[in-house]
Image: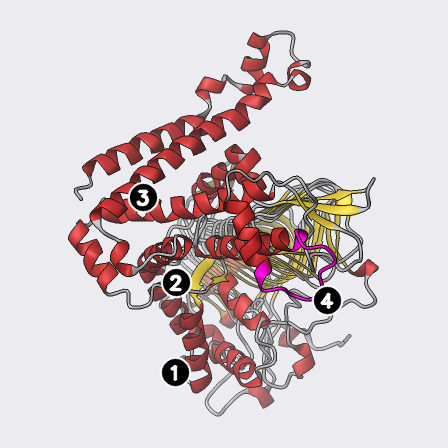
């Protein structure tokens, strides 16, 4: 709204009087947010003369306040309006990388702002209502301003505003039906809870109340910039809360943002970026033409090379470059690198990797923009995969190139899903990763652990391929395979025959039986065409082997630090040997019963802040290793149909030795799957010699991951040798 007023009023009346309580003024919030505590004084007549002589101007020099350590000679060709307070100055220059600038204010316009100690402000055309920390560098910035209703990316409504002005993130669905209210400190677990349970109005109302309790509805908060932050060669920066040691250069626009940054985890935002209505975590990198609107970027994540992130939440330790992501909730360790990949209206539960040309969740093949994709950990849609809403995928699903025109429900983990165009059918290999690509699968765990740069790891993010969620899925897959094989033996069957699972189990466990016939999977695709399962027997046996390995490794880990007597006590106290149901809560696995208890306590008012809820996550994280051990024991008990008294020393020793054998087999499979790359003639044909190939890709014997796995085998052998049964 265009207005014209007297020049002497510039810099005043930041907050309309109708929004001020008795005893408050336009500076109340500003003074509450002070970064520096100084004794300010008025300028002397001599200092004002020097300022005039240096080309400076103010219609009211009495509102320019300084400290005793003030050097007027280092203020040149600048204008001051409203209450401006300048911290200590020294005859020095500050530098960051190759940029070296004298302390002071040069060729700039300052409106109602607080400036910290030894700040360098050069060619800032418009700086309005900011609080700057110490040793900040601002160089060649067109516009830095703050509105009286600044929210810094949080989804709150200020006094006098309408509900329609609230910023929300429309996650998981384009129709806004799962919208969440963003807030600084929001974790993937929080976003997940807020997008679920939409039928529980009481719970959803409590989530909103808890969020709003964290913030003031009052107007008049200033933008802040922390100590030693550098901003240079940028255009528009408005309504921002920026931490210390951040580095911002060449941005087009930053508006309504919280940018977390500290010395040990500084955030960098680079050239050509336009970021609006968002929250950025510690240690993030955003550069080269990124466009992000209504978003949360969690700590130690990256957006780069023209990535578009809109109405989305990206978890910790993730990278998105080049491509477009809309309306999605992405748990930690998400990777998406290619310009022509597209992800929309999806819940992806971590450790995922989107290939070039993958189109996941386009609503253009649906009747309305209200579909969703849900994928477990390790989701990997391959080159040029196109998927339709609504679809659901178990953990570590790998999808082969193809256009899948119908909805999919892939319930068996570690599967390869392919579109057999010639025969117009879908083909699934359950447990594919274990059978054919052990190298890539096992490398996942160490890869994501190494990428976890969080400094405070009080929330246990599960990166292991074998964990309660994937093991529970494998148990479901065993039943699916038994049923599918059993049903395939019965011609023209109708309905669900309870004997199918029994018959299928007999076939799958009999070493003399070789399954040669066609095996169909029911309700895996929303079509009338076939969905076939291949390698059913191999898959069935490898699932069982990996469940046993999971139990064995957990036992070895426990017995490496505890005695067999302590294990016996633990087993004796396990009154319920049933597998617990776990929920992937933002890459933290929690027992469903613990989550249910949390939700009930939130509804009853026992939790009134997200900090308290996060403390509950941390408590569950501390208990998780023990809960995982209990789950592993219960899993093996169920797998082998054991009674509680079966767990004697001899039985435990047998399981441990079997675990060692499986680890040796895993290492052999890792080596075998990687060695194919050195033996394949089509891979070798681009090299003139074996020596050249080894120079380019390295020698197989020097492969770091293979050698790491060999070290892990040696460690396991040592641990087992030390266990006294």
Please state the extent of the stretch shown in magenta in the rendering.
487-499
Element marked by disc 1: loop
Above or below 593: residue 250: above
Of the numbered discs 3 and 1, the one sitting upstream in the chain is 1
Q: Which residue is drawn at 39% across and 66% down?
A: 617
Please give the name of the residue rendered at 30% of the width and 38% of the height, measured from the top-left corner: 657
Name the foreground residue: 525 vs 115.
525
- Please tell me whether mark 3 sits on a helix, a strand or a loop: helix
**C-alpha distance separating marks 2 and 1:** 48 Å
Q: Tell me the mark number nearer the camera, choosing from 2 and 1.
A: 1
Question: Per the image, is 279 magenta?
Answer: no
Q: In which quarter of the image is the N terminus?
A: bottom right
- Residue carrying label 1: 606
Distance from label 3 to label 1 (Cα)? 44 Å
> Tag 2 or tag 4, which sits nearer the N-term?
2
Choose top left, top right, bottom left or bottom right for residue 94: top left
The residue identified by callout 4 is 174
Q: Quadrant of residue 236?
A: bottom right
Helix, strand or loop at label 2? It is loop
Disc 4/disc 1 C-alpha distance (Å)? 33 Å
Q: What residue is drawn where x is 31% and y is 58%?
A: 626
| Residue picked out by circle 3 | 655
Marks 2 and 1: CB-CB under 8 Å?
no
Identify the residue under disc 2: 67
Q: Earlier in the sequence, mark 4 or mark 1?
A: 4
């Amino acid at each position: 709204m265009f207005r014209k007023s007297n020049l002497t009023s510039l810099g005043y009346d930041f907050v309309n009087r109708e929004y001020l309580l008795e005893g408050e003024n336009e500076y109340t919030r500003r003074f509450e947010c002070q970064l520096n505590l100084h004794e300010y004084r008025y300028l002397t007549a001599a200092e004002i003369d020097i300022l005039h002589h240096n080309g400076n101007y103010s219609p009211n020099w009495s509102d320019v306040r300084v400290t005793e350590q003030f050097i007027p000679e280092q203020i040149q060709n600048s204008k001051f309006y409203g209450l401006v307070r300048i911290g200590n100055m020294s005859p020095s220059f500050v530098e960051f990388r190759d940029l070296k600038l004298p302390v002071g204010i040069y060729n700039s316009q300052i409106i109602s702002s607080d400036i910290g100690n030894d700040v360098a402000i050069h060619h800032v055309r418009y700086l309005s209502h900011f609080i700057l920390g110490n040793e900040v560098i601002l160089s060649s910035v067109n516009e830095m301003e703050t509105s009286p209703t600044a929210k810094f990316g949080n989804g709150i409504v200020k006094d006098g505003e309408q509900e329609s002005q609230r910023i929300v993130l429309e996650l998981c669905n384009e129709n806004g039906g799962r919208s969440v209210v963003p807030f600084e400190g929001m974790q993937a677990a929080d976003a997940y809870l807020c997008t679920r349970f939409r039928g529980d109005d009481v719970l959803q109302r409590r989530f909103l109340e808890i969020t709003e309790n964290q913030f003031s509805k009052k107007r008049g908060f200033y933008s802040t910039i922390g100590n030693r932050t550098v901003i240079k060669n940028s255009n528009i920066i408005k309504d921002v809360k920026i931490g210390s040691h951040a580095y911002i250069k060449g941005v087009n626009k930053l508006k309504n943002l919280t940018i977390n940054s500290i010395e040990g985890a500084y955030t960098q935002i680079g050239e050509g970026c336009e970021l609006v209505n968002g929250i950025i975590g510690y240690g993030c990198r955003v550069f080269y033409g990124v466009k992000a609107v209504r978003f949360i970027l969690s700590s130690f994540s990256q957006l780069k090379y023209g990535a578009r992130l809109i109405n989305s939440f990206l978890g910790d330790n993730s990278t998105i470059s080049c491509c477009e992501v809309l309306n999605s909730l992405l748990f930690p360790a998400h990777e998406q690198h290619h310009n022509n990949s597209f992800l929309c209206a999806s819940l992806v539960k971590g450790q995922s990797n989107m290939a070039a040309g993958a189109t996941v969740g386009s609503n253009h093949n649906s009747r309305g923009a209200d579909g969703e994709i849900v994928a477990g950990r390790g989701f990997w849609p391959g080159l040029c995969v196109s998927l339709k809403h609504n679809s659901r995928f178990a953990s570590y699903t790998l999808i082969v190139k193809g256009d899948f025109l119908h909805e999919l429900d892939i319930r068996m983990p570690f599967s390869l899903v392919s579109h057999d165009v010639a025969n117009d059918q879908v083909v699934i290999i359950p447990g594919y990763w274990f059978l054919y690509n052990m190298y890539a699968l096992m490398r996942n765990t160490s890869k994501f652990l190494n990428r976890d740069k969080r400094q405070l790891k009080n929330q246990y993010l599960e990166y292991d391929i074998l964990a309660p969620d994937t093991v529970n899925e494998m148990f479901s897959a065993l039943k699916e395979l038994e049923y599918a094989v059993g049903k395939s033996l019965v011609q023209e069957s109708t309905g669900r025959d309870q004997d199918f699972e029994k018959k299928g189990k007999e076939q799958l466990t009999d070493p003399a039986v070789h399954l040669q016939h066609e095996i169909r999977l029911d309700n895996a695709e929303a079509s009338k065409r076939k969905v076939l399962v291949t390698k059913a027997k191999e898959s069935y046996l490898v699932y069982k082997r990996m469940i046993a390995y999971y139990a064995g490794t957990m036992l070895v880990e426990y017995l490496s630090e505890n005695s067999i007597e302590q294990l016996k006590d633990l087993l004796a106290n396990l009154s319920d040997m049933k597998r617990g149901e776990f929920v992937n809560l933002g890459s933290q696995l929690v027992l469903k019963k613990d989550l249910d208890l949390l939700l009930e306590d939130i509804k009853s008012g026992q939790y009134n802040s997200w900090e308290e809820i996060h403390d509950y996550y941390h408590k569950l994280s501390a208990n998780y290793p023990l809960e995982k051990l209990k789950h592993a024991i219960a899993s093996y008990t169920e797998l082998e149909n054991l009674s509680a008294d079966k767990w004697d020393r001899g039985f435990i020793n047998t399981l441990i030795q079997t675990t060692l054998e499986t680890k040796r087999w895993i290492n052999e499979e890792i080596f075998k799957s990687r060695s194919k790359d050195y033996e394949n003639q089509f891979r070798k044909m681009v090299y003139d010699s074996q020596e050249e190939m080894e120079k380019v890709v390295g020698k197989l014997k020097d492969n770091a991951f293979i050698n790491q796995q060999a070290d892990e085998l040696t460690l396991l052998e040592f641990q087992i040798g030390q266990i006294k049964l």
